[in-house]
Image (cartoon, rainbow, N blue to C red):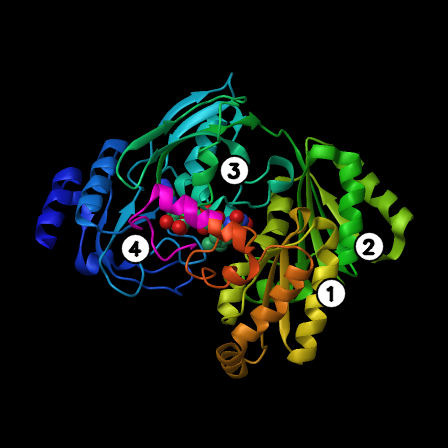
């Protein structure tokens, strides 16, 4: 039976595009090394027709499929389950053609396996911008994976999440039929917007094979500011102040706590302090297509209007200087890894309440676990904070995490719930939050999600054990 299945799959994709046994190992462990599963095989189809034939074959043999892009996601959605071992990893990396770029319509049509770097490059070659920006994984993550996790990143403030950057999709459904929703229209009120069901679905409703993406005018100049502040509240007020003046030209507004800065300075070569003195929090702000001088002026006017929360700032239009500043923000996750494991949260609250969230969560955790070290950083501009807890002493940290992870999660998530926030802002649910979400999403939403899953995938073959 199994041999028959593998022979048929090999016939569809060719012998070079199917791996079994030890060769599958790198495709079975997730980026954080938290989940390792076992795959029947890993296949690399090279076009939509092959994806469709493979999915039909799986449906016939009742074999579950794990769609996979660059395998960079952070919640264990892209790897097979540990239990069992009978899942097929369907990796889209061989489908990497840029099918069309239409600079007049400001769209491009790309296959799901294109890396984000190549999508951005192809847009640039036509003097256009594809604004999704995930610098740390640009060369590894693929557009199908970005769509399936509805990735955010630093540019959400100006351009929205990946969902906002898509006009059309082609999807292979769990029974192998190909749904052609490859529209490149900016207006289409002809019934339910089906494409949006597949975006952020983490591969549980079908396999995205092609997408029509929105393009934008290229930004000509960027002014970048680093600002030292006393407390997150100053950040929230500054955000509102700058936004009122810069409007959509404000393209990034990130916050970094001193604790994050310390681990980056310790582990990432070539990084240095932003200022001679040390401060509790830092902001990295980017405004596109405005001159450096107005950003200086805006920050000075902010100091005049709400004073001492802003300690120091510096503004640059020089790309190399800005790049060095961004290094401090973009390397936090990697630096943190070198420091040891931590209990991570990817939460969102209304932008106006970010400071309140940090203050409340800090106070609750410090009271429950005196000495706990909190690394708070992220996309303040969209209310999305990565809020990570650990103990500074490595030996103690392991015990702390082993014994208290659930408790820490509950304390943080209760604050999020109380503020009508989300416990999963941009990384998805995958395996990691599949169970936890049940306590934080309203029962009717969960019921509707189950019903949608049932319509698309009645046999539960598309990425089972993820999201739901
Ligand atoms: C260092 C680092 C920094 C990051 N920073 C950010 C950030 O700032 N903002 C943010 O939003 N995210 C961030 N992420 C997460 C990032 O969004 C995801 O890792 C990325 O979008 C996933 O792309 P991928 O190709 O690797 O997908 P994979 O990891 O391979 O897959 C992700 C999910 O999508 C499914 N999938 C993949 N391809 C398809 C397809 N073609 N059809 C259907 N389902 C599919 C998989 O089954 C899985 O559930 C970061 C990750 C890392 C490692």
- Whether the magenta-drawn stretch holds residue 458 is answered as yes
Q: Which residue is mark 4?
A: 27
Secondary element under disc 4, as helix, strand or loop, is helix
* Chain-order first, disc 3 or disc 4: 4
Q: What residue sits 71% from the left and 55% below the top?
A: 354
| Of the two numbered discs 2 and 3 in the rendering, the one whose residue sits closer to the viewer | 3
Residue position marked by numbered label 3 in the rendering: 163
**Residue 21 drawn above or below residue 119:** below
Sequence-wise first label, 4 or 2:
4
- Residue at position x 64%, y 45% in the image: 322
Q: Does ligand 1 reach within 8 Å of label 2's beta carbon?
A: no
Q: What distance separates the C-alpha of mark 2 from that of mark 3?
A: 35 Å
Q: Secondary structure at mark 2?
A: strand
* Residue 375 magenta-highlighted: no
Q: Label 3 crowding class (10 Å Cα cut-off): few <14, some 14-19, many 20+?
A: many
Residue 310: mark:
2
Q: Residues within 10 Å of mark 2 (few under 14, many from 20)?
A: many
User: For the magenta stretch, what is the residue range?
Assistant: 448-468
Tell which of 411 and 243 is nearer to you: 411
User: Which mark lies nearer to you, 3 or 4?
Assistant: 3
């Amino acid at each position: 039976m199994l041999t028959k299945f593998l022979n048929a799959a090999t016939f569809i994709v060719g012998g070079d595009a199917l791996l079994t046994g030890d060769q599958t190992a790198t495709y079975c462990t997730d980026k954080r090394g938290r989940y390792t599963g076992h795959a029947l095989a890993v296949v690399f189809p090279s076009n939509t027709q092959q994806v469709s034939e493979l999915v039909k074959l799986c449906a016939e043999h009742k074999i579950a499929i794990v769609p996979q892009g660059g395998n960079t996601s952070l919640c264990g959605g892209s790897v097979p389950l540990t239990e069992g071992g009978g899942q097929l990893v369907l990796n889209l990396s061989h489908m990497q053609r840029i099918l069309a770029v239409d600079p007049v319509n400001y769209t491009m049509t790309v296959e799901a396996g294109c890396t984000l770097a190549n999508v951005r490059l192809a847009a640039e070659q036509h003097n256009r911008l594809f604004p999704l920006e995930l610098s740390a994984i640009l060369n590894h993550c693929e557009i199908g994976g970005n769509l399936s996790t509805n990735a955010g990143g630093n540019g959400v403030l100006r351009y929205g999440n990946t969902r906002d950057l898509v006009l059309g999709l082609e999807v292979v459904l769990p029974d192998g039929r190909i749904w052609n929703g490859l529209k490149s229209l900016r207006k289409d009120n002809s019934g339910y917007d089906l494409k949006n069901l597949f975006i952020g679905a983490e591969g549980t409703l079908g396999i995205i094979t092609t997408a029509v993406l929105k393009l934008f005018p290229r930004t000509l100049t960027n002014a970048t500011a680093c600002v030292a502040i006393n407390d997150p509240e100053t950040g929230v007020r500054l955000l509102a102040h700058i936004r009122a003046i810069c409007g959509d030209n404000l393209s990034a507004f990130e916050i970094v706590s001193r604790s994050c800065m310390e681990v980056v300075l310790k582990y990432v070569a070539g990084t240095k302090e932003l200022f001679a003195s040390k401060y509790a929090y830092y902001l990295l702000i980017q405004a596109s297509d405005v001159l450096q001088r107005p950003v200086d002026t805006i920050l000075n006017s902010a100091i005049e209007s709400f004073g001492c929360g802003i300690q120091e700032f510096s503004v640059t239009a020089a790309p190399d200087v800005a790049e060095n500043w961004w290094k401090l923000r973009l390397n936090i996750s990697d630096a943190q890894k070198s420091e040891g494991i931590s209990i991570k949260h990817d939460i969102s609250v209304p932008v106006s309440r970010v400071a309140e969230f940090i203050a409340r969560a800090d106070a609750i955790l410090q009271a429950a676990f005196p000495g706990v070290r909190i690394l708070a950083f992220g996309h303040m501009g969209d209310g999305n904070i990565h809020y990570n807890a650990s103990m500074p002493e490595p030996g103690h940290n392991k015990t702390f995490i082993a014994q208290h992870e659930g408790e820490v999660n509950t304390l943080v998530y209760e604050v999020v719930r109380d503020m009508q926030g989300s416990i999963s802002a941009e990384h998805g649910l995958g395996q990691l939050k599949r169970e936890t979400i049940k306590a934080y999403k309203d029962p009717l939403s969960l019921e509707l999600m189950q019903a949608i899953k049932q319509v698309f995938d009645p046999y539960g073959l598309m990425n089972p054990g993820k999201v739901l």
